[in-house]
Image (spheres, rainbow, N blue to C red):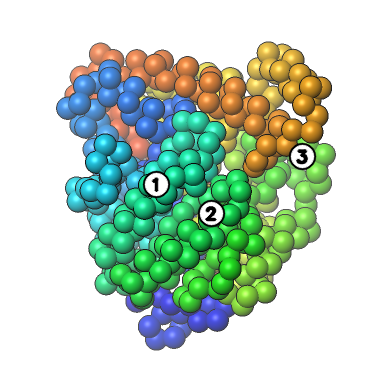
Amino acid sequence: MALRVSGTRLVDDAGSPVRLRGVGLGGWLNMENFITGYPANEAGMRSAVREVLGEERYELFFERFLESFFSEADADLLREVGANCVRIPVNYRHFESDDRPMEVVEHGFRHLDRVIGALGERGIYSVIDLHALPGAQNQHWHSDNPTHVASFWQHRHFQDRVVNLWETIADRYKDDPWVAGYNPVNEPGDVSGRVIGPFYDRLVKALRAVDPGHVLFLDGNTYSTDFSIFREVYENTVFVCHDYALAGFAHGGPYPGYTRGEWCDRDELEQAFERRTRFQRETGTPIWVGEFGPVYTGDPSVDEQRYQILRDQLEIYDAHGAGWSLWTYKDVGLQGLVCAGGPYMRRFGSFIAKKKRLGADRWGSTMEESGDDLAPLHRLVETEFPTWDPYPWGARYQTDDLVRHILVAQALLPEYAELFRGLDDGELLALADSFALEGCSRREPLIRLLTDNLTG
């Protein structure tokens, strides 16, 4: 049944409260390097693979990948776990091409329609999340950004295209009760902080003109942490926070314990959550954590600490009546409830290990890889530019982003693409099918933890 905001809660048509709790479908209609094993950004990866395979076989592989990555079997598993919501990240490139801006591609909706339908048949809501915008709305790979510049906020042309695309999406799903709502801009990173507020005003007005009924899920600036940019509390709107725990990152320390000089325990987790949701509580609007979740290492003792972080966060959310969407459902091993295996991991496993050794993926990096090589550069920056504090996370992160996660990652693209060379059609399809649920391993402790929370 269709949802709407009523005070601090979401309610259905009957007025019964609904707390959306589930997972994000990362790595599917918006592919990410650490989720599926490639380096750098999605568009760069696709271009490199297309060059090796040719157009026809490139389409064969990626069409099968999209079919296999999420099927009715996956929807069944999420229903069994007890999830009632899936946040679906999408890349604008499925619906519009840069060489034909403002022309929406109907064919691009085929898989989104399929999955929204499959989830709805099982009583599971979808939140459509535009994760990658033209020009890139933030500084990192997950907005399909090959640079460190969020050009979306600098060019009205990109903003016009997003308004046009969302008008089309809203018109398409305005009568679908199993679409919980629209998450129009994932983790915006407007450096100035001056463009995002007026843009949201414009986008909300345009969306409401097409679809006045669906809930809007709006992220704050600086990766959904800064809500000072909102000049009004829009009607029927959830203001979305993201709540990653410092100790849960790949470079996280013990829990409880110190990570890079900062203490993290349950009390600190709750204090961080309360800071990140102050705006929602002050405005009396629903609390929904659009992303959170630790990274797992394969070390049982470390991973048990990561599960404890998750247990503590879920208890905190329950105490505050907060909804949530765990990041992420399926990947090659860092965070997923289920993890790909089979031919894909046999073919790409050593390459993924090389990426890990080099720290090429921002999300999988401990910030210590290639330490002897990068230490002189970090010392140079600290010595020569001691006051440099670039947006969003400072000098150390910016240096790593530029060197590891852009330069090194892009240098790895040809090597990744070459691993597709020489494969016949059957072998390509087998690679794609490695992401089908029946070919995946299940992270049983995580699945049990979520099931206990959702159904207990």
In this view, the mark in front (3 or 2): 2
Task: Tell me residue 7's x, y (percent).
Answer: 55, 81
Q: Is residue 196 left or right of residue 28?
A: right
Toward the left, the furthest residue is 56
**Mark 3–mark 2 distance (CA, rounded to whole Å):** 34 Å
Q: Residues within 10 Å of mark 3 (few under 14, many from 20)?
A: some
Q: Which mark, residue 294?
A: none
37 vs 453: above or below: above
Q: Above or below — where is 257 with respect to 348?
A: below
Q: Label 2, label 1: how many angstroms apart (C-alpha)?
A: 13 Å
Q: Nearer the viewer, mark 3 or mark 1?
A: 1
Task: State the image coordinates of residue 29 (x, y, percent, origin top left).
Answer: 35, 45
10 Å neighbourhood of mark 2: few (<14), some, or many (≥20)? some
Residues 393 and 200: in front is 200
Instruction: Tell me what residue is drawn at x 71 percent, y 30 percent.
Output: 396
* Quadrant placement of the N terminus: bottom left
Which disc, if any, is residue 195?
A: 2
Give me the C-alpha separation between circle 3 and circle 1: 38 Å
User: Residue 129: horizontal and vertical position, in percent?
Assistant: 42, 55
* Front position in the image: 298 or 151: 151
* Residue picked out by circle 1: 158
User: What amino acid is at disc 2?
Assistant: Val
Q: Looking at numbered disc 1 in the image, what kind of residue is underneath it?
A: Phe
Height in image: 6 above or below 229?
Answer: below
Q: Is residue 222 left or right of residue 182?
A: right
Q: Position of residue 413 (x, y in %)?
A: 42, 20
The quadrant where residue 148 appears: top right
- Quarter of the image where the C terminus is located: bottom right
Residue drawn at the location 43% of the way across and 66% of the way down? 204
Secondary element under disc 2, as helix, strand or loop, is loop
- In the picture, the disc for residue 259 is 3
Image quadrant assignment for residue 431? top left
